[in-house]
Image (tube, rainbow, N blue to C red):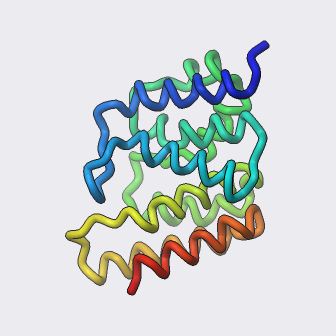
Amino acid sequence: MMNHFALLAKSLRLAAQYHAQQQRKSDGSPYINHLIEVVDMLVNIAHVQDENELCAAALHDSLEDTEITKEQIANELGICVLEMVQALTDDKTLSLTARRASMLEQLPTKATSVQRIKLADICSNATAIPCGWSNERLTEYFVWLDQVAELCKNASPSLYDEYLKRKASTIK
């Protein structure tokens, strides 16, 4: 049986492999940096020690943004990780507005671990805003982020505080 560091390393390796050609829209940095930041916040701010939650955090965008399969995640990391990743996966057949509404509708029923990953995700996203966004788009985005943060704040008050700090540093 693998220790949790080996499982986490495997999830980060898979994330790096499948997101290899992707970049953050905000600054063109490698997308894997976002995934590492989400894992880092869960470890160092929320004090998560659950290996499955950390692995799911590393792969939280993989089903919607890469060619990795559900079967591959289940086979490599287990069904628990897959279920969390699926719970965080947007249905890309829906419009952005419908995806956001769906997330807000479903988040209250999601596991605490899923809510924590989502909260760490929006913390990272709150400080990765593309420079070309209009004030209107920025305002609209933060209205949605605020709604997500509010729904997830009980999953990790420390991550919620981090979100508020990051939002304040972005919106000046």
Q: Residue at 25%, 72% (x, y): give it.
A: 133
Q: In the displayed image of the protein, which residue is found farthest to the left?
A: 132
Task: Work out which quarter of the rendered image holds the N terminus and state it.
Answer: top right
Q: Residue at 66%, 60% (x, y): give it.
A: 107
Quarter of the image holding residue 161? bottom right
**Residue 45, how many percent across, how many down?**
68, 59
Quarter of the image holding residue 126? bottom left
Q: Residue at 33%, 42% (x, y): give it.
A: 30
Q: In this view, does 69 lie to the left or right of 39?
A: left
**For the image shown, how many numbered marks are present on the structure?**
0
Q: In the displayed image of the protein, which residue is found farthest to the bottom?
A: 172
Q: Classify 145 as above or below 55.
A: below
Q: In the displayed image of the protein, which residue is found farthest to the front?
A: 44
Q: Which is more toward the observer, 41 or 86?
A: 41
Task: Work out which quarter of the rendered image holds the C terminus and state it.
Answer: bottom left
Q: In this view, does 127 lie to the left or right of 22?
A: right
**Residue 117, how many percent across, how many down?**
63, 52
Q: Residue at 76%, 21% (x, y): give it.
A: 3
**Residue 16, how many percent across, how many down?**
43, 30
Q: Classify 54 as above or below 115.
A: above
Q: Which is more toward the observer, 113 or 13?
A: 13
**Residue 114, how many percent across, how many down?**
68, 50
Q: Which is more toward the observer, 87 or 171?
A: 171
